[in-house]
Image: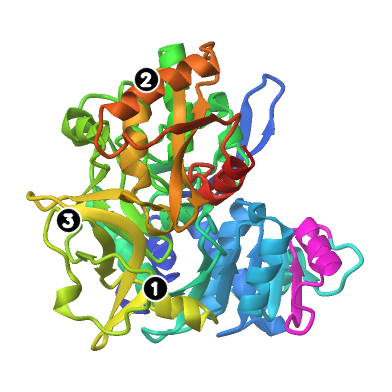
């Protein structure tokens, strides 16, 4: 196939281009086992091999009926097989349904019921859960097992590959702009997980944004600790190096294994949520380690604390930054800011209660701030917008914005505003735009504490307490007290802190008195370990903390 002939909008076209231009470049690297000297041994696929494998699997999928528009649940661990399957499903034009396995069987079952997949591709334990929990009995027609098939029917991936090998190339499906490529479920950190509908055109736009914003070049090595971002690697011409860790439990990642992967492959890009940034930064500081190969770090999933950024920044060469893009499953990347600006200027405003700076919108992103309301907004009117400097809900329109949640019309109506043919997404975040045009994030709208003295915003309040050396993190929650809520600050101490709880609370109470927006916080509770989201282990489940606080 000639490179000039590839005009297909299918997101898998990026892989085909890589296979033609750089067939022998590594596309995916994954840990396989530990050798006799205690070193990690890896397996890999080149761009050419990954393209061939996905062609073979696509042929196999089509032979059993998994073709265009067939909704297919994919529950497979990050691996070369995972990458080959994803691109094979894109090539046949199937709709991939992706769900975090760490969210628990009940939530997974609810998500699957909403999506109604007709095919189920998973590791053996995923099939065991499917049968035991009765997932989608009425909709699933095709089963594929990645690994050994036990007592259920269907096919194995090996069987499909064997069938597909009889034909070399595969002619990809040609999608229209609005054809669905995937249903990606949110983490559910602020409620029930919802399936954001991704088209091929949205995926394509995201790839181009990532290339442009971060100047990512073909041939780079990416340590991706989040499976979804890892998929962008081959499309961006990067090698996706899968670290030896449980992606559903990033807080348990072993920093030695992360560092080993960085050093073994000369990683140039690291995609890491704030939990991994914290782990890597603390380890680098304690072991006096530098990462000379790294050109950039991209941290997303939740706001990263300035002190955490500073630790990792010290392990990078001069001029190399940790970027903290702003976005969500429904729309990303929207804004961008680097650690140099954060540590030089923005952190001091964060520590004085001004929120977290998320930077300027990327080119082509139309970001605005509107009046705070929990009601639906059916149509856009200009009077919704608030003046610069005033708190409101952040909204966005762009070609990377998803237009709906799958099979959830009520949630779609609450999250979308229509301006003619343009769909404006309500981020559900509180923030403001400063006089320079930069945006600031102040917390989730659903997390604001409604007191008799006015609304209190989580990130603004927590920022002034997080600077205490014995505090790992804090979380503001509201406890219902008649018509209004009473603010309560939950506190998680640093792991090695030996300060007495009463002493710490006394010192935090003194901090509260120094700021107008925190002076009314009277109740402080020490919590052993905050509940966090399953995807990033970084977003705090404030709803669960609020229930705990009531009990206290």
Which residue is painted at 33% across and 68% down in the image?
Answer: 373
Q: Earlier in the sequence, mark 3 or mark 1?
A: 3
Q: Count the numbered circles shown.
A: 3
Magenta span contains residue 135: yes
What is the x, y in percent for residue 155? 79, 72
Q: Decide: few, some or many residues near mark 3? Use Cα within 10 Å; few <14, some 14-19, many ≥20.
A: some
Q: Give how far apart the Cα atoms at labels 1 and 2 are.
A: 43 Å
Q: Secondary structure at mark 1?
A: helix
Mark 1 or 2, closer to the camera: 1
533 or 225: which is nearer to us?
A: 533
Q: Give how far apart the Cα atoms at labels 3 and 1 are.
A: 21 Å
- Left or right, 484 with respect to 218, comes to right
- 223 in relation to 9, above or below: above
Question: CB of mark 3 within 8 Å of CB of mark 2?
Answer: no
Query: On the image, which quarter does residue 379 sit in?
Result: bottom left
What residue is pinned by disc 3? 390
What residue is pinned by disc 1? 415
Magenta span contains residue 358: no
- Left or right, 515 with respect to 536, comes to left
What residue is pinned by disc 2? 290
Query: On the image, which quarter does residue 352 sit in?
Result: top left
Coloring scheme used: rainbow
What is the x, y in percent for residue 203? 39, 68
Looking at the rendering, the stretch of residues picked out in magenta corresponds to 123-148
- 442 in relation to 140, above or below: above
């Amino acid at each position: 196939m000639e490179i000039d002939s590839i005009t297909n909008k299918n997101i898998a076209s990026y892989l085909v281009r890589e296979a033609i231009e750089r067939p022998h470049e590594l596309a995916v690297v994954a840990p396989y086992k530990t050798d006799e000297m205690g070193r990690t041994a890896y397996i890999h696929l080149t761009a050419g091999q990954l393209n061939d494998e996905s062609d073979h699997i696509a042929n196999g999928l089509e032979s059993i009926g998994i073709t265009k528009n067939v909704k297919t649940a994919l529950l497979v661990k990050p691996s070369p097989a995972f990458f080959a399957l994803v691109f094979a499903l894109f090539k046949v034009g199937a709709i991939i349904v992706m769900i975090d396995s760490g969210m628990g069987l009940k939530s997974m079952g609810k998500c699957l019921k909403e999506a109604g997949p007709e095919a189920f591709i998973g590791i053996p334990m995923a099939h065991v859960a499917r049968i035991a929990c009765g997932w989608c009995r009425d909709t699933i027609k095709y089963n594929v097992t990645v690994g050994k098939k036990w007592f259920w029917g269907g096919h194995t991936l090996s069987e499909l590959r064997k069938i597909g090998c009889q034909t070399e190339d595969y002619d990809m499906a040609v999608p229209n702009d609005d054809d669905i490529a995937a249903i990606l479920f949110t983490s559910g950190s602020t409620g029930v997980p919802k399936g954001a509908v991704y088209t091929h055109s949205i995926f394509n736009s995201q790839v181009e944004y990532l290339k442009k914003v971060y100047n990512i070049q073909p041939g780079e090595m990416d340590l991706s600790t989040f499976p979804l971002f890892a998929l962008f690697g081959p499309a961006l011409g990067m090698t996706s190096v899968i670290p030896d860790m449980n992606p559903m439990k990033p807080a348990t990642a072993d920093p030695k294994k992360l560092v080993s992967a960085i050093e073994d492959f000369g990683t140039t890009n690291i995609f890491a949520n704030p939990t991994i940034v914290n782990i890597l930064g603390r380890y680098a500081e304690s072991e006096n380690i530098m990462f000379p190969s790294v050109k950039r770090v991209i941290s997303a999933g939740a706001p990263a604390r300035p002190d955490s950024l500073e630790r990792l920044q010290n392990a990078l060469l001069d001029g190399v930054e940790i970027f903290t893009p702003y976005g969500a499953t429904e729309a990303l990347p929207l804004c961008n800011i680097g650690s140099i600006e954060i540590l030089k200027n923005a952190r001091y405003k964060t520590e004085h209660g001004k929120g977290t700076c998320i930077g300027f919108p990327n080119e082509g992103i139309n970001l605005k701030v509107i009046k705070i309301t929990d009601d639906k907004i059916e149509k856009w009117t200009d009077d919704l917008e608030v003046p610069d400097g005033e708190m409101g809900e952040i909204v966005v329109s762009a070609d990377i914005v998803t237009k709906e949640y799958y099979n959830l019309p009520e949630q779609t109506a609450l999250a979308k505003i229509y301006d003619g043919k343009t769909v404006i997404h309500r981020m559900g975040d509180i923030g403001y735009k400063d006089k320079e045009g930069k945006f600031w994030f102040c917390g989730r709208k659903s997390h604001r504490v409604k007191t008799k003295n006015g609304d209190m915003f989580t990130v603004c309040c927590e920022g002034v307490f997080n600077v205490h050396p014995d505090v790992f993190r804090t979380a503001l929650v509201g406890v219902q007290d008649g018509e209004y809520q009473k603010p309560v600050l939950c506190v998680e101490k640093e792991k090695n802190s030996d300060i007495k709880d009463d002493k710490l609370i006394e010192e935090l109470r003194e901090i509260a008195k120094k700021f107008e927006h925190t002076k009314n916080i009277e109740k402080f509770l020490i919590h052993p370990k905050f509940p966090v989201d399953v995807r990033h282990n970084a977003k705090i489940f404030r709803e669960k903390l609020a229930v705990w606080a009531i009990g206290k």
